[in-house]
Image (spheres, grey):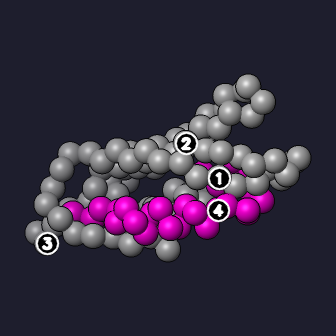
Amino acid sequence: MVRVIRAGPVDNVHIETTFSAVCPIDHSIDNYVIEIDYKPSCNTDGCNYLELSSLREWLDEFKGRVIYHEDAINEVINVLVKALSPIEITVTLTSNYRGIKYVVRRGINK
């Protein structure tokens, strides 16, 4: 599961990394580029930020897992919203299947 740290305020956070899963249709490996953009929620104690090593470990758990792109992005955003309670967040998932670039995006604003 992802962990959160508390630190001083910034306007926006952009994270870009990769992970993989298994296509439910033909069982090929789906390689993804994931972009996470969020505006952190803050109070007098600081702001909520993703702890990056826990994000990496959690995304690595998708390896070998059979899941559709759309279900993967929904799971990711639901976990991140629960952990961060961001003011706004957008997750973009990009894959390339046999030369076809496929991009799915999901955003939530409070």
Instruction: Tell me the amino acid under the disc marked 2.
Output: Val
Label of residue 20 in the image: 1
Q: CA distance from mark 3 to mark 2?
A: 33 Å
Mark 2–mark 4 CB contact (< 8 Å): no
Q: Earlier in the sequence, mark 3 or mark 1?
A: 1
Judge whether residue 46 is colored magenta: no
What is the number of the mark on residue 62? Answer: 4
Q: Looking at numbered disc 3 in the image, what kind of residue is underneath it?
A: Asp
Q: Which secondary structure lies at badge 3?
A: loop
Outermost residue to the left: 44
Residue 77 visible in the picture: yes
Q: Nearer the viewer, mark 3 or mark 1?
A: 1
Q: Which residues are magenta?
A: 47-73
- The alpha-carbon separation of the residues under discs 2 and 4 comes to 13 Å
**Residue picked out by circle 3:** 45
Dot 1 falls on a residue whose secondary structure is strand
Q: Quadrant of residue 43?
A: bottom left
Query: Which of labels 3 and 4 is toward the front?
Result: 4
Lower position in the chain sequence, tag 3 or tag 2: 2
Amino acid type, label 1: Ser
Residues marked 1 and 4 touching at CB (< 8 Å): yes
x, y percent for residue 110: 37, 53
**Residue holding disc 2:** 33
Of label 1 and label 4, which has the lower sequence position? Answer: 1
Q: Residues within 10 Å of mark 1 (few under 14, many from 20)?
A: some
Q: Is residue 56 magenta?
A: yes
Left or right: residue 4 versus residue 8 is right
As helix, strand or loop, the secondary structure at mark 4 comes to loop
